[in-house]
Amino acid sequence: MMTISTKNPIASTYHHGDLRQQLIDAACQQLLESSADQLSLRALARRVGVSQTAPYRHFESKNALFAAIATQGFELMTQDLLPVAARYRDDIVQATVELGLTYIRWSLRHPEKYQLFFDSSLLDPVNHAALTLAGAECFAVLTGTIQRGKDQGLFLDKPVELLAGTLWASVHGLASLLRNQTRRNAEFTNDPADQASRLLLEEQRYVMTLFVSSIQRQG
């Protein structure tokens, strides 16, 4: 006679060491579905089918969970950026454009992780060394590319951190606008701001080229 197991398949893998990642995945899904304020470790425990105390073996607080998600997010973004920098290594200007486009696309694919990078109301990175390191390694892909451009006389003779920060501010602003439009999931209207958002979405490469030109040497 066939028997049907009622054991939660997610909970059954807990002793195999998968719970930490399951909690991260479940938290990411909940962040996509609702606000961060509504997320709790106890609710996540119910979601993955483990005891309410089990998550605390991996995360001492919600802040620690958010730090783990953000750390993983930076690591994933770095994995996307590094091949782009390598592919266009012989054309630094193009490499910088492609890095910006990759950043934007990543932010749109992973909005639940991206929001944790910069929202200090959700996460204070000061006490999370792994997060600080992951963020620095991600930013280093951009600064390394810009430094090579400076060495070749392609970019302005300003501190590389200033050039990278200028570019990052522009790209982050664009990513945030596009994320807001995507989150609204609404049709574009004839409102001028809506039309601007539509054009920014459709003309990302052109806009990114303008951003990069702002740090290029002229003449």
Image (spheres, rainbow, N blue to C red):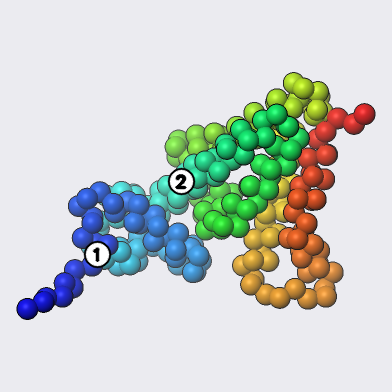
Whether label 1 touches label 2, CB < 8 Å: no
Q: Which residue is mark 2?
A: 72
Q: Is residue 83 shown left or right of residue 12?
A: right
Callout 1: helix, strand or loop?
helix
Give x and y (percent) for residue 39: 42, 64
Give x and y (percent) for residue 33: 49, 69
Between the C-alphas of marks 1 and 2, the distance is 24 Å
Residue at the limit of the structure toward the bottom, as seen here: 1
Residue depicted at x 40% and y 51%: 65
Q: Is residue 131 shown left or right of residue 44?
A: right
Residue depicted at x 76% and y 65%: 198
Residue at the limit of the structure toward the top, as seen here: 151
User: Amino acid under label 2?
Assistant: Gln
Name the foreground residue: 184 vs 55. Answer: 184
Q: Is residue 171 shown left or right of residue 49?
A: right
Who comes first in sequence, dot 1 or dot 2?
1
Residue depicted at x 50% and y 34%: 133
**Circle number at residue 9:** 1
**Circle number at residue 130:** none
Q: Which numbered disc, 1 or 2, marks the residue closer to the eye?
A: 1
Q: Is residue 119 visible?
A: no
Residue depicted at x 81% and y 68%: 195
Above-or-below relation of 189 to 16:
below
Callout 2: helix, strand or loop?
helix
